[in-house]
Image (tube, rainbow, N blue to C red):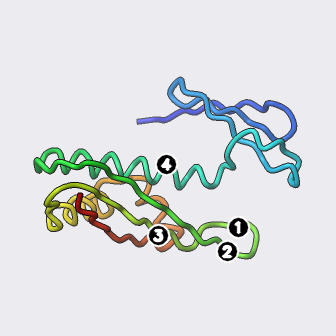
Amino acid sequence: MSTKVRIKWNGNMAFDADVNGFAIRMDATPEAGGKNLGPRPKPLTLAALGGCTGMDVVSILEKMRVTLESFDMKIEAEQTDEHPRVYKKIHIVYTFRGKELPLEKIQKAVDLSQEKYCGVSAMLRKAAAVTYEIELLSE
């Protein structure tokens, strides 16, 4: 299966990506010659990681009949000092809110995403240490 994304230069340091018909503007800071019209490309990989693992977790928990009131993630990455500056450590905090949340099912869903299903995590793990933790907040 092939994936195609179109990227168009939009002047200065701005680029527009067409991803499955959805537009994403990327730009640099003014100090780097941009106008700050969009996110930088590298953090978008963290957003892709969150979307990938989040979709897995929600799908798995739905199959397990776990009802969530809310679910979010914080993803923090540390990069190398030398160029090319790549992420060397990535940490995900999965935060779940709801009534009587079953930790064992949530842990299984997150583990399955990270160890089996999330392709973005698998790709990033080839270059960086990816760690994660779970927070349960009872409502």
Q: Which mark is residue 48?
A: 4
Which residue was labeled with disc 2?
80
Q: Is residue 45 left or right of residue 97?
A: right
Q: Is residue 133 left or right of residue 50?
A: left
Spatial CA span between label 1 and label 3: 17 Å
Residue 11 in the image: x percent, y percent? 85, 32
Disc 3 element: strand
Amino acid beneath label 1: Arg
Residue beneath the point at 24% across and 60% down: 112
Res 26 → quadrant: top right
Spatial CA span between label 4 and label 3: 14 Å
Which residue was labeled with disc 1?
85
Q: Earlier in the sequence, mark 1 or mark 3?
A: 1
Residue 16 in the image: x percent, y percent? 69, 32
Spatial CA span between label 2 and label 4: 20 Å
Q: Which mark is residue 91?
A: 3
Give the crowd class for mark 4: few <14, some 14-19, many >=20 residues within 10 Å: few
Q: Is residue 54 left or right of residue 62?
A: right
Give the crowd class for mark 2: few <14, some 14-19, many >=20 residues within 10 Å: few
Q: Earlier in the sequence, mark 3 or mark 2?
A: 2
- Quadrant where the image shows the N terminus: top left
1 vs 3, front mark = 3
Spatial CA span between label 3 and label 2: 15 Å
Disc 4 element: helix
Residue 131's place in the image compared with 57, above or below, is: below
Q: Earlier in the sequence, mark 2 or mark 4?
A: 4
